[in-house]
Image (cartoon, rainbow, N blue to C red):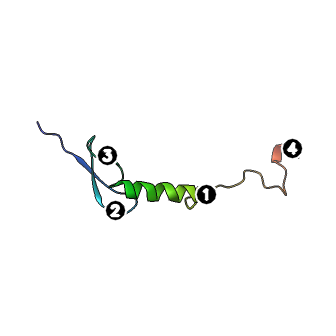
């Protein structure tokens, strides 16, 4: 019985990457794409949206 190898897209350039132990930089296609992604995180280009639970102007409802 042969195993199917999963193919994923490189998050940086979109190239096809085989998801297997021999794929050294997975999920990236190369060290270059991996370092580009790391640089984006270091530059804070990637951000997660956040909302304040309690804006400074209003106290929480249980403290009123």
Q: Earlier in the sequence, mark 3 or mark 1?
A: 3
First in sequence: mark 2 vs mark 3: 2
- Mark 1–mark 4 distance (CA, rounded to whole Å): 27 Å
User: 10 Å neighbourhood of mark 4: few (<14), some, or many (≥20)?
Assistant: few
Q: CA distance from mark 1 to mark 2?
A: 24 Å
The mark that comes first in sequence, 4 or 3, is 3
Pointer 2 residue: 14
Q: Which numbered disc flags the more N-terminal residue, 1 or 4?
A: 1
Mark number displayed over residue 63? 4
Mark 1 lies on a secondary structure that is: loop
Q: Residues within 10 Å of mark 2 (few under 14, many from 20)?
A: few
Q: Mark 3: which secondary structure?
A: loop
Q: Which residue is mark 3?
A: 24
- x 36%, y 50%: residue: 27
**Label 1, on which residue?**
49
Rounded to the nearest angstrom, the CA distance separating label 3 from label 1 is 31 Å
Q: Marks 2 and 4: CB-CB under 8 Å?
A: no
Quadrant in the picture for the N terminus: top left
Kindly report the distance in space between the C-alpha atoms of the residues bearing marks 4 and 3.
54 Å
């Amino acid at each position: 019985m042969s195993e199917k190898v999963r193919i994923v897209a490189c998050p940086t350039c979109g190239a096809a990457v085989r998801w297997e132990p021999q794929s050294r930089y997975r999920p990236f296609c190369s060290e270059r794409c991996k370092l580009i992604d790391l640089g984006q995180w270091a530059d804070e280009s990637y951000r997660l949206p956040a909302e304040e639970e309690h804006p400074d102007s209003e106290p929480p409802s249980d403290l009123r």
